[in-house]
């Protein structure tokens, strides 16, 4: 009994034709038929045999080897895992993790993926949320989905790409847009618009001259090439973002209600298909310690953790996915984001409670020498994971080929255990098991921390420093001076230099965009149905009072949507904060979440999704706590939208101007 | 029977839906054409839409030019089939040598999207006969590589033979030579334009309705009005 | 595997705004002995067998360069030149 | 005037979407013996005096290349290489 030839050691060249849909009539059928269980060796291997095996495997750590070498030292601290977290992994597995498993736990239990510090607070969004009959999918999905008519739903979400955008502004911002677009796509929606909220250090700082043009060109480069109109955003300057700019990107998508997709890898025997770009050593900076620490001491240098985006591939991926949805060819789908295959495999399996068997050798690679943990950790962009019924596989590969997108069957869905406990994720490489874990342990059983909170000591000073005590300009000269100062302030100046680099016309449905307060997109040409969106935040207010600051950001976005004539329906948010290990930051975070949740309850609209970005600081100094809030509203006929400028009428000169509010 | 206007979709085309909508608003039937299918399905005219075909990698339009559909389009255009290339479509027409010159990186090196005033320099083409001579129109421009260049002799010839179809008025948005925004072939059936008429066909979504003129022109042309 | 390098540069009479932008930035970096900068493309083609340079020239003329605005040169890469990944 | 050529290529492990798009287009043009294509920049600097290659390397590192994702090489142009306009 041998494994199929294309998974054998000699056949590691992934470019070999026939592996990819684009290369021919496709391959995966054999996988659909299932991999006999007996092919995965399970017995323990001893002495001589083991060492021969190890050379064949390039020293890669297998499940057998892990079981036989319980005391082997592993670089888990370098991967960001604490002693107790590592102990829990050992306990859950009943042995030490393999290298690949360690990489996977370190990724899935990271702050970024597990929300381990924020979870206890974010619960309020659900608990305090008003009941909403519009919500088809909420927090926990790739993006929240809101029903806006009998037939149509919209989905939207904002996400951060702050750190990558500081390292490599163009690519960091570009892949930030690419990532949020795939989230929207994964829900079954066609992406139809983007927005971007940007924060930089001082406008006249030399490094801002590096970061800002790169970020703006990257947001534009990727979004323009995808054909998504940019309908709004923010550009804010403040010293606190000097070493840590904020790049928050939002995407809006539209779907027919019955096209909603989910990520569950349901249906034993269904095929797991990887579609999109080849996998390379992108963004594996973190786990490269696994190779260097254990095997190639001082060998390869730290890999650049920068990913390069290919918007053209993403555009093809979008068209291919939409065609698959419309033909009802996929059972489940998940985008590959920051945590790559690791996240997509474990989340799809955990969502269904099934197991999964994956032949890692089948993953098409850009660099054939990649090791299993690198393949699993790779953050290569423009990839999606599909769950496909075996009889639909051929049609899926054909659709992918039509759009020139590689698609490869890499595994299959396996049953839960007989006693009803969820199945296991079994990953093989060169015929050996390198991962054998219960998927939910990575997704749901990660650590959760109620971190200590402490009100920052300077709050008292802020409270004492009332606006009423500030000197007011009270002479003509002082007024003149104040006005001049304001109109030359970077935060108030015209943002055309930025917004002109974005296409706002593509798709022909942009009803309002820059310089309006909110973007408005028509989503149904027949009825004129449309949605309005605004994205707002204010780090300074939130620094002064996180609870009110978050509420104010919500109120601003809500107002901006309401003034267009739209009814606000739902909220997304991106919470940009410093280190959660700093009690003062954690207090800011807790207060801001409480404020946002209370604000949403008062306004009667739910938070449908969002993103938390911690560890935003320059040196030891955290950025201002910066919740960025997106509000979505619906307008029955976009022809009724209200523009922000005064409208010229026949009675020009007779118009009355009112100031509403206090 | 309404005129049938084919709109080609290349991998990476973005404004194909908009071009089809514009054709429909003008009263034509829009027929989708696929880059890999050399058959033009009997259309009366073809639009090569805007976008980033093949990611605009290498040079804009360089790879799309070799698509199977383009071989047919090139032959048919030489026989008189009206073809309008918008933005990326203009770039493809230049790469395919159906139009002289080339489109290069904007002088200021940025992608730029703004509402732009143009002057229609000739109404003597299949795509501009519905305008009046020297009409000033407002349509969006949006490109990163829209700077038209050609050698001086070609530019002189284009001017002399009335092949300059439209010029930028006011600030030149990309550094195009002689403010050229659109050119035609000698016969006037093939026109390339950098700005986007298909984005100025509806009150709600465009800065004006001026773009419609290109699509009503082709209908007039096909109905037998002299080109 | 043998590699062919195709260098593509804008014709001298065509404005190269990118090169100009770099040239303009140099003095502020203390570089004042550069008279001009031109920026083009370097294309490395890795062949599975012996490359036919004439065919590469044809390819360059048709696809890799636009003869309306660009000049190109074609040559076999020296063994010492940086390699594309295998 | 002496010329220095700076060749800038993406690091081998970095995705090169441009090169990939060209490589994918080749078969339809009848070219099937190209295994991979990488596209980078060729920068020609024309000096008024004797160029100091170490200083050019510094310049490449700071301005001409993006060392996060790109590698570069610096060399004096041979007399036979295509000239930039004088
Ligand atoms: N980064 C950005 N991306 C897209 N649009 C932006 C961006 N920054 C600002 N805008 C848009 O520019 C316009 C003016 O912005 P701004 O000066 O911040 O106005 P306001 O204070 O009214 O929000 C708004 O329509 C806003 O959406």
Image (cartoon, coloured by chain):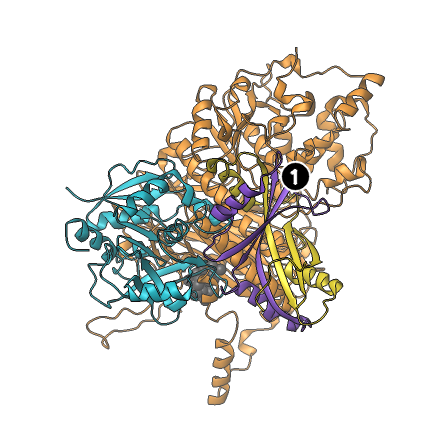
Chain colours: A orange, B cyan, C purple, D yellow
- The residue indicated by pointer 1 is C2
| Side of A386 where A453 appears, left or right | right
Query: Picture coordinates of residue B135 (x, y %)?
Result: 24, 67
Q: In the rendered image, is residue B226 in sight?
A: yes
- The quarter of the image holding the N terminus of chain B is top left
Residue A150, image x, y percentages: 30, 38
Q: What is the quadrant of residue B209 in the picture?
A: bottom left
- Where is residue A516 drawn, in percent x and y? 38, 62
**Vertical relation: A464 (above or below) A611:** below
Q: Which part of the image, by quadrant, shows the C terminus of chain B?
A: bottom left
Residue reaching furthest to the top: A1
Residue A623 visible to an observer of this rendering: no
The residue nearer to you, when weighing A76 against A28, is A28
Q: Say if C43 sits above or below B186 in the image.
A: above
**Category of crowding for the residue at label 1, using alpha-carbon neighbours closer than 10 angstroms: few (below 14), some (14–19), many (at least 20):** some
Left/right placement of residue A146 relative to residue A627 reads left
Q: Secondary structure at mark 1?
A: loop
């Amino acid at each position: 009994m041998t494994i199929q030839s294309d998974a054998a050691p000699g056949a590691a060249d992934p470019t070999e034709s026939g592996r990819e849909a684009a290369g021919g009539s496709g391959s995966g059928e054999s996988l659909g038929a299932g991999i006999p269980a007996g092919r995965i060796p399970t017995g323990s291997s001893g002495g001589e045999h083991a060492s021969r095996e190890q050379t064949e495997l390039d020293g890669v750590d297998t499940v057998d080897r892990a079981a036989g070498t319980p005391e082997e030292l592993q670089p888990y601290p370098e991967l960001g895992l604490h002693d107790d977290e590592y102990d829990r992994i050992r306990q859950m597995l009943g042995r030490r993790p393999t290298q690949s498993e360690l990489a996977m736990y370190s990724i899935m239990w990271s702050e970024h993926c597990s929300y381990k510090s924020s979870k206890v607070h974010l619960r309020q969004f659900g608990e305090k949320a008003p009941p909403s009959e519009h919500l088809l999918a909420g927090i926990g999905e790739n993006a929240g989905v809101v029903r806006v008519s009998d037939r149509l739903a919209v989905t939207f979400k904002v996400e951060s790409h702050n750190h990558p955008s500081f390292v490599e502004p163009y690519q960091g911002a570009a892949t930030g847009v690419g990532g949020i677009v795939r989230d929207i796509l994964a829900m079954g929606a066609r992406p139809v618009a983007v927005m971007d909220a940007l924060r930089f250090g001082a406008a006249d700082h030399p490094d801002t001259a590096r970061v800002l043009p790169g970020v703006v060109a990257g947001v534009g480069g990727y979004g323009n090439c995808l054909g998504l109109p940019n309908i709004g955003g923010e550009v804010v300057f403040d010293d606190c973002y000097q070493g840590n700019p904020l790049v928050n990107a939002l995407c809006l998508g539209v779907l027919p209600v019955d096209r909603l997709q989910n990520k569950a890898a349901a249906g034993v025997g269904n095929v797991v298909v990887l579609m999109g770009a080849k996998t390379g050593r992108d963004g594996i900076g973190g786990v490269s310690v696994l190779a260097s620490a254990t095997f190639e001491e001082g060998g390869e240098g730290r890999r650049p953790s920068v990913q390069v985006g290919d918007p053209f591939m993403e555009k093809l991926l979008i068209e291919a996915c939409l065609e698959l949805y419309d033909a009802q060819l996929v059972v489940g789908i998940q985008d590959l984001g920051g945590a790559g295959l690791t996240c997509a495999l474990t989340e799809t399996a955990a969502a269904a409670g099934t197991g999964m068997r994956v032949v890692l050798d089948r993953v098409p690679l850009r660099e054939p020498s990649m090791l299993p943990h690198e393949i699993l950790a790779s953050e290569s962009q423009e990839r999606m994971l599909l769950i496909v019924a075996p009889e639909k596989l051929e049609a899926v590969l054909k659709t992918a080929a039509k759009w020139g997108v590689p698609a490869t069957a890499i595994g299959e869905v396996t049953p839960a255990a007989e006693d009803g406990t969820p199945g296991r994720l079994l990953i093989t490489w060169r015929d050996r098991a390198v991962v054998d874990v219960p998927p939910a342990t990575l997704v749901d059983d990660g650590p959760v921390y109620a971190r200590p909170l402490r009100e920052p000591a300077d709050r008292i000073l802020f409270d004492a420093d009332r606006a009423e005590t500030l000197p007011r300009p009270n002479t003509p000269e002082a007024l003149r001076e104040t006005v001049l100062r304001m109109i030359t302030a970077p935060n108030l100046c015209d943002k055309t230099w930025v917004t002109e680099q974005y296409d706002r016309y593509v798709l022909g449905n942009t009803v309002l965009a820059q310089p309006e307060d909110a973007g408005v997109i028509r989503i149904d040409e027949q009825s004129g149905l449309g949605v309005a969106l605004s994205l707002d935040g204010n780090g300074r207010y939130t620094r002064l009072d996180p609870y009110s600051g978050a509420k104010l950001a919500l109120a601003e976005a809500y107002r901006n949507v309401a003034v267009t004539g739209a009814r606000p329906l739902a909220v997304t948010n991106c919470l940009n904060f410093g280190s959660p290990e700093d009690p003062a930051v954690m207090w800011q975070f807790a207060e801001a979440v409480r404020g946002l949740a209370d604000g949403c309850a008062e306004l009667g609209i739910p938070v449908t999704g969002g993103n938390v970005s911690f560890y935003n600081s320059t040196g030891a100094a955290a950025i201002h706590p910066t919740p960025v809030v997106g509000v979505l509203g619906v307008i029955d006929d976009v022809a009724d939208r209200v523009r922000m400028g005064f409208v010229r009428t026949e009675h020009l000169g007779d118009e009355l101007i009112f100031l509403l509010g206090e | 029977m309404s005129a049938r206007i084919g709109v080609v979709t290349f991998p990476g085309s973005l404004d194909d839906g908009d071009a089809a909508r514009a054709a429909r608003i003008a009263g034509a039937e829009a027929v989708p054409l696929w880059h890999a299918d050399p058959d033009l399905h009997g259309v009366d005219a073809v639009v090569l839409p805007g976008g980033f075909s093949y990611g605009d990698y290498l040079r804009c339009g360089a790879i799309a030019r070799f698509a199977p559909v383009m071989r047919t389009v090139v032959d048919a255009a030489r026989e008189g089939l009206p073809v309008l290339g918008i933005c990326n479509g203009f770039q493809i027409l230049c790469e395919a040598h159906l139009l002289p010159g080339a489109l290069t990186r904007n002088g200021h090196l940025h992608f730029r999207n703004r509402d732009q005033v143009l002057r229609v320099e000739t109404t003597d083409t299949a795509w501009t006969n519905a305008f009046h001579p020297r009409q000033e129109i407002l349509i969006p421009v949006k490109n990163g590589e829209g700077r038209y260049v050609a050698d001086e002799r070609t530019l002189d010839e284009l001017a002399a033979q009335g092949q300059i179809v439209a010029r930028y008025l006011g600030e030149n948005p990309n550094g195009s030579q002689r403010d050229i925004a659109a050119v035609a072939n000698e016969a006037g059936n093939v026109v390339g334009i950098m700005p986007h008429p298909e984005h100025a066909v509806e009150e709600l979504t465009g800065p004006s309705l001026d773009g419609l003129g290109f699509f009503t022109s082709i209908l007039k042309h096909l109905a037998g009005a002299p080109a | 595997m043998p590699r062919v390098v195709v260098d593509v540069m804008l014709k001298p009479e065509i404005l190269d705004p990118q090169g100009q932008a770099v040239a303009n930035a140099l003095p502020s970096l203390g570089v004042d002995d550069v008279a001009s900068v031109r920026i083009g493309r370097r294309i490395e083609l890795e062949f599975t067998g012996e490359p036919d340079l004439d065919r590469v020239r044809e390819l360059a003329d048709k696809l890799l360069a636009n003869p309306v605005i660009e000049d190109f040169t074609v040559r076999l890469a020296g063994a010492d030149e940086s390699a594309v990944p295998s």
